[in-house]
Image (cartoon, grey):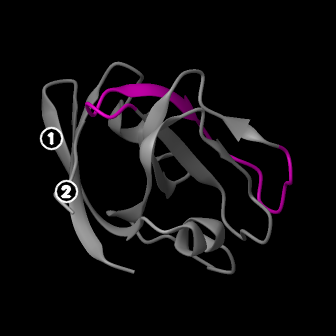
Amino acid sequence: MPKGRVAIESAGRLHEFSVEIAATAENRGMGLMHRRAVPPGTGMLFDFQESTIATMWMQNTYVSLDMLFIAADGLIVNIARDTVPFSTDTISAVGRVRYVLELAAGTAARLGIKPGNTVKLPAH
């Protein structure tokens, strides 16, 4: 998968992450499945190519994640925190989004990231 960087503005600070970019249906379908860890400062950015009501799940995902649902303009719409590994429950955006950023569980709380914060997205 291609790689890039995202930065999130929160509480007057800029938090940067190195991400894999899942921009194809095949890559989005695989996501972070079968990974045993998500190192600090890393994550995966899902690009749906257009605004949609994005839905995710945790099937075959070993680690708990924070999922940030992001509008096309970079605004965080909602966050699913501390998702349950291996769950097939649907995790949804509360509005139309273009992106979902997956980070290690607890990252959003630790850094004070919340809906309404802005994500600077990579050009791709």
Can you identify the residue that label 1 sits on? Answer: 14
Q: Residues within 10 Å of mark 2 (few under 14, many from 20)?
A: few
Amino acid under disc 1: Leu
Farthest right residue?
88
| 1 is within the stretch colored magenta | no
Quadrant that contains the N terminus: bottom left
Can you identify the residue that label 2 sits on? Answer: 122
Q: Relative to 8, is 13 on the left or the right?
A: left
| 82 is within the stretch colored magenta | yes
Mark 1 residue element:
strand
Measure the C-alpha gap from mark 1 to mark 2: 15 Å
From the top left corner, tell me how far across and down residue 29 is, in percent: 65, 68
Let me know if residue 54 appears in the view. Answer: yes
From the top left corner, tell me how far across and down residue 9 is, in percent: 19, 33
Q: Residue at x 37, y 71 (%)?
A: 20
In the image, the segment drawn in magenta is 71-89
Q: Does 118 sit above or below residue 24?
A: above
Q: Nearer the viewer, mark 1 or mark 2?
A: 2
Let me know if residue 32 appears in the view. Answer: no
Precedes in sequence: disc 1 or disc 2? 1
- Between 17 and 21, which is closer to the camera in this rendering? 21
Q: Relative to 93, is 100 on the left or the right?
A: left
Q: Relative to 47, is 13 on the left or the right?
A: left
Q: Residue at x 23, y 53 (%)?
A: 6
Q: Does 95 sit above or below residue 52?
A: above
Q: Does 3 sit above or below residue 112?
A: below
- Between 119 and 66, which is closer to the camera in this rendering? 119
Callout count:
2
Quadrant that contains the C terminus: bottom left
Is most of the magenta stretch helix, strand or loop?
A: loop
